[in-house]
Image (cartoon, rainbow, N blue to C red):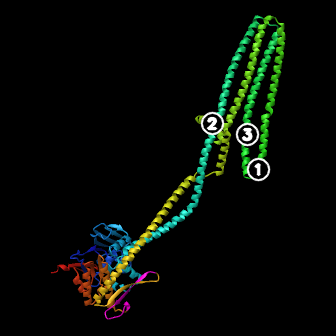
Amino acid sequence: MYLEKLELQGFKSFAPKTGLEFLLPKDNKRGITAIVGPNGSGKSNVADAIRWALGEQSMKAIRGKKGEDVIFSGSDKKTRSGFAEVSLYLNNDKKMTDNPYSEVVLTRRFYRNGDSEYLLNKNKARLSDIHLMAAKSNIGSKSYSVIGQGMIDKILTLSDDERKDFFNEATGIKQFQIKKEQSLNKLNASKKNLEQVEIVLQEIEPRLRSLRRQAKKLEEREKIEVELHSLEHAYYGNLWKDIEDRIISESAKLQKIESKWKNKRGEIQEIQKEFKKIEKEKPSSETFLALQNKYQKLLEEKSKIKEKEWKFKGKTTSISMREITEEIDEINNKQKKLIKNLRAEKINTAIRVLQKLETFTENLLKKINGEPDKKLNNIKKEVQEFEQKIIDVKKEVEILAQKESAEKNAFFEKQRKLDARQNEIFYLENDLNNLKIELARLETKREGLEEEMKIEGVKLSLNVVETQHGASLQNREETFRKIQRLKHHVDMIGGIDPETPKEYKDINKRYEFLHGESYDLKNSIDSLEVVIKELNVIIEKRFNNAFSNINKYFDKYFKILFDGGSAKIIKVTKEDKNFGIEIHATPPGKKIKNLEVLSGGEKALTAIALLCAIMANNPSPFVILDEVDASLDEANSIKFANILEELSKKTQFVVITHNRATMEKASVLYGVTMGEKGVSKLLSMKLEDRG
């Protein structure tokens, strides 16, 4: 890499756009470009521009006080500029930077409103990117690449931190230190982030554990409810199907008996028709007819009373079963309330509930064994009285029949047949009444069961009932007990907010994310610590090697400039385990080492020797020297110029000078003049072309 061109616009005294082009390397030399001109012409602004473009942040280093001091301030005949811009055109054929382009254009621009920007090949860049690129290329605003006015004297008087930073640049480890600093910043940021993540994890872990327990309980309750739901369907389905089957069976019996009853009733009607026919053919005696009419009326009255008995039984059974079912439901509710109070150890409340429970039970027994049975007994007694009257009338009819003539035998035969049918009708009606009562009881029981199912939330469809009944329960009582145990288990788990699973899922997702972040941060921290250790090894190794080489070159150039003597640099360990660098110089014929006792000229030569040693050990692509030879006499100027010529094989030099010996070594000479408008102008000459 080397400097091809420098462009300035609006920078200090260079108001219009001005370009300085540098010669390409030739004959294994990178060449020396000399910039000359009278004092005040603005030639040192060239060095300031290069330093500024490389990212210099100290205005003092470029001879200014505030940012806008770099912008052309105007003159009597030329208005001030709105911005300052400097561009460095760097040849990158050997790809000394990560930039893939063969030419790297580094631009810095600053506006009067305070806005500024850096560009790399016209793309916006950060200052840190500029510093890293410069460090990798072994150039930089703070390094020995730009040695400004007065810096030669200061090299020997730098503070420990400044001298250490200077030697970091000189030994070529700056790029690794920048990487180390970036890694340390990332490490500290990662540790802070990890600390924050760990704090958040600690905050949400208790809530997550609580939600996990609740979610687990909810999951357990859902499993229990599924089993409970299945058992309830099986249990109630089995009960309902049993009742339904019995209703169907009893209904079939009822239809069959009703059919028989209709047949017998038809036979009786036929016999009665025959009686009427006999009456028309051979009228009976008045007594016989009176007894016959009395007998028929008694039978009719008996039938009415039996019908009354059947209706009363059906009505009583229907009403009683409904009332009894309601009473039983109330008793069940009070039993549950009693159990709940006992569990809660509310003894007084439990006693009151128990007393009410006894009262309900007594009332229920009265309803079962009370008033309706008395009325039914009276009806039965009335039926028995009619039956006795019928028997008495039959006896009278039989006595009368014995007295009647033989032609009455046929009548009595039919009468016996009618009696037989009447008895059959009586038993059939009794069976019908019993079946209707049983059906009413079963239907009431089914209604009660369906109401209980409704309360329990059990919904059964016909196909479910068929399936559940088909797989009939082995032990209905055990199933009922299991249902009660499962209900108790559900009650023990208690109510859980249905939003709990969603909250648990959200918090668990966040926890897993943060846990992953923690894992990644820990890995990042481990990786960064490894990188920092590796960089420390590289920095130490490179520094020590470079430090040793600089020491050799330092002694070499010191001897050249002083015609003898010795010089060295020493690394001194401090109490804080850091190190400082001491410079020892002994001119020929003297036994001193302390720099403070050297004369001004000796200090300048020592600093130049050290600077040349650094450039020889770790050549920078280009070096800007701003009047570093100003204090040298003619003899030393020639020595210095010879050294520059030797070093120009590895480094491109741009030298701002008044020294004739330095100018003679230059391949290109730029002259800087100051016009009347306060604007610097450039004149160039290729000295290698002179005949």
> Amino acid under label 1?
Thr
322 w.r.t. 116: above or below: above
Q: Earlier in the sequence, mark 3 or mark 2?
A: 3
Task: Judge left or right: residue 86 versus residue 318.
Answer: left
Rounded to the nearest whole Å, what is the CA distance between mark 1 and mark 2?
Answer: 41 Å
Residue drawn at point x = 51 percent, y = 57 percent: 509
- For label 3, the residue is 328
Identify the magenta region: 577-596
Q: Position of residue 24 (x, y in %)?
A: 23, 74
- For label 1, the residue is 349
Residue situated furthest left in the rendering: 691
Q: Nearer the viewer, mark 1 or mark 2?
A: 2
Q: Position of residue 360 (x, y in %)?
A: 77, 41
- Viewer can see residue 179: yes
- For label 2, the residue is 472
| Label 1 Cα neighbours within 10 Å, binned few <14 / some 14-19 / many ≥20 | few
Residue drawn at point x = 80 percent, y = 17 percent: 298
Q: Nearer the viewer, residue 561 or 310?
A: 561
Image quarter (top left, top right, bottom left or bottom right) of the C terminus: bottom left
- Secondary structure at badge 3 equals helix
